[in-house]
Amino acid sequence: MSQITKDTIIADILNIAPDSAPLFRGIGMNCLGCAMASGETLEQACAAHGVNLDDLLTKLNKLAT
């Protein structure tokens, strides 16, 4: 099992925790298959979308277990 961190790329998160897609979409991160998802870190995505990084990390790591 991999732990998701602020530096994890969005596309990698989707591989680690496939059930995370609805969570991303629910907070407005809808472009999960776009080029940005392949190179953008979770921290960068949260900053761009105004999402609390720590809260999202907690939720994502629960899905990854």
Image: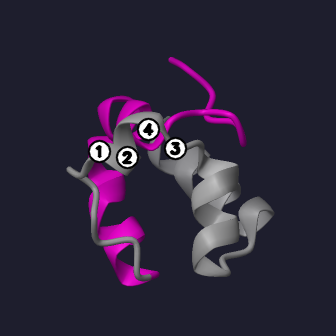
The residue tagged 3 is 40
* Horizontal and vertical percent position of residue 61: 59, 44
**The residue under label 1 is which amino acid type?**
Ala
Q: Residue at x 36, y 55 (%)?
A: 20
Q: Residue furthest front?
A: 35
User: Disc 1, disc 2: CB below 8 Å?
Assistant: yes
* Horizontal and vertical percent position of residue 58: 69, 56
Q: CA distance from mark 3 to mark 1?
A: 9 Å
The residue tagged 4 is 13
Q: CA distance from mark 1 to mark 2?
A: 5 Å
The residue tagged 2 is 37
Q: Residue at x 70, y 52 (%)?
A: 43
Q: Is residue 9 magenta?
A: yes
As helix, strand or loop, the secondary structure at mark 4 comes to helix
**The residue under label 3 is which amino acid type?**
Glu
Compared across the picture, whether 2 is left or right of 22 comes to right
Q: Residue at x 24, y 52 (%)?
A: 34
Q: Which residues are magenta?
A: 1-27
Q: Mark 4 vs mark 2: which is more N-terminal?
A: 4
* Horizontal and vertical percent position of residue 26: 37, 81
Q: CA distance from mark 1 to mark 4?
A: 15 Å
Compared across the picture, whether 60 is left or right of 15 comes to right
Q: Which mark is residue 35?
A: 1
Q: CA distance from mark 2 to mark 3?
A: 5 Å
Q: Nearer the viewer, mark 4 or mark 3?
A: 3
Q: Residue at x 27, y 43 (%)?
A: 18
As helix, strand or loop, the secondary structure at mark 3 comes to loop
As helix, strand or loop, the secondary structure at mark 2 comes to helix
